Structure formats: structure tokens, C-alpha cells
Image (cartoon, rainbow, N blue to C red):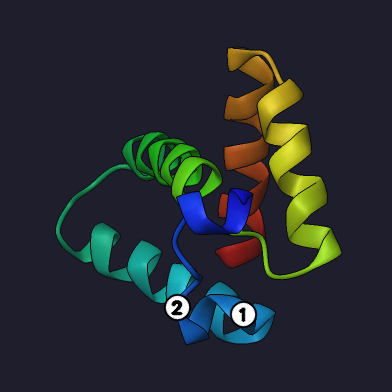
């Protein structure tokens, strides 16, 4: 039932290396346009919120991340988004 309410992940999201590479490229492009790292982190947090609500987890790890995100307080979510930023940078 839950799977019917959310979107299936795009192919590149199913591959960690490709997903991480895409985020890294987005960070580099953002810097070229003068977007601050802090702003990119804020966008990352909003993106994670969207993915958590709309995209079905394809693996147990993604399900765990979703559960962690849903259990986290706003400040903890900022920390999680910052960690994703560090992994991709």
C-alpha cells in the first residue's frame, strides 16, 4: 500500500556512486554561480524532505535513512543534510 503512495526512485538514485557524483556536480555548479555552501545545505535539506515524503525506499538502507529523517528534530535534520553535503563534496 505504501509503495502506491510514493514515487519509484529514478535509476540514478538506486546507484549510490552515481547519486553521490550527481550531488558533487551540483555542488560544483552551485559554487560557479556564487551559491553559498550554506544555501546548498538548505536546499539539500528540502530535497531530503521531498525524497522522504515522495520516493519509495529501494533498499533497507534507504528505509533506515527515511526512518531516521522522520524521527529527527529539525536541528538533527540539518546535521543529516550537512553530512550528505560533506559526503558529496
Q: Please tell me which residue is depicted at 72% across the width and 21% down the height of the picture.
A: 72
Q: Residue furthest left?
A: 33
Q: Quadrant of the C terminus?
A: bottom right
Q: Going by the image, does 49 lie left or right of 71?
A: left
The quarter of the displayed image where residue 66 is located: top right
Q: Please tell me which residue is depicted at 67% across the width and 13% down the height of the picture.
A: 73
| Vertical relation: 81 (above or below) 84 | above
Q: Are marks 1 and 2 in contact (CB under 8 Å)?
A: yes
Q: Position of residue 48 (x, y in %)?
A: 50, 44
| Vertical relation: 53 (above or below) 14 | above
Q: Please tell me which residue is depicted at 61% across the width and 49% down the height of the picture.
A: 2
Q: CA distance from mark 1 to mark 2?
A: 7 Å
Label 1 sits on a secondary structure element that is: helix
Of the pair 1 and 12, the residue shown nearer to us: 1
Q: Which residue is mark 1?
A: 14
Q: Residues within 10 Å of mark 1 (few under 14, many from 20)?
A: some
Q: Residues within 10 Å of mark 2 (few under 14, many from 20)?
A: few
Of the pair 14 and 18, the residue shown nearer to us: 14
Q: Please tell me which residue is depicted at 21% across the width and 65% down the height of the picture.
A: 32
**Observer able to see residue 70:** yes
| Vertical relation: 84 (above or below) 87 | above
Label 2 sits on a secondary structure element that is: loop
Q: Position of residue 23 (x, y in %)?
A: 46, 68
Q: Position of residue 64 (x, y in %)?
A: 82, 48
Q: Residue furthest front?
A: 1
Q: Which residue is mark 2?
A: 10
Give me the disc on residue 62. none
The quarter of the displayed image where residue 20 is located: bottom right
Amino acid at each position: 500500500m505504501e509503495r502506491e503512495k510514493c514515487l519509484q526512485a529514478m535509476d540514478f538514485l538506486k546507484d549510490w556512486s552515481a547519486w553521490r557524483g550527481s550531488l558533487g556536480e551540483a555542488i560544483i555548479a552551485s559554487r560557479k554561480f556564487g551559491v553559498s555552501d550554506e544555501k546548498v545545505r538548505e536546499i539539500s535539506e528540502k530535497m531530503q524532505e521531498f525524497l522522504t515524503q515522495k520516493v519509495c525506499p529501494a533498499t533497507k538502507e534507504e528505509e533506515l535513512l527515511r526512518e531516521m529523517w522522520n524521527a529527527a528534530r529539525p536541528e538533527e535534520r540539518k546535521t543529516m543534510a550537512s553530512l550528505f553535503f560533506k559526503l558529496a563534496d
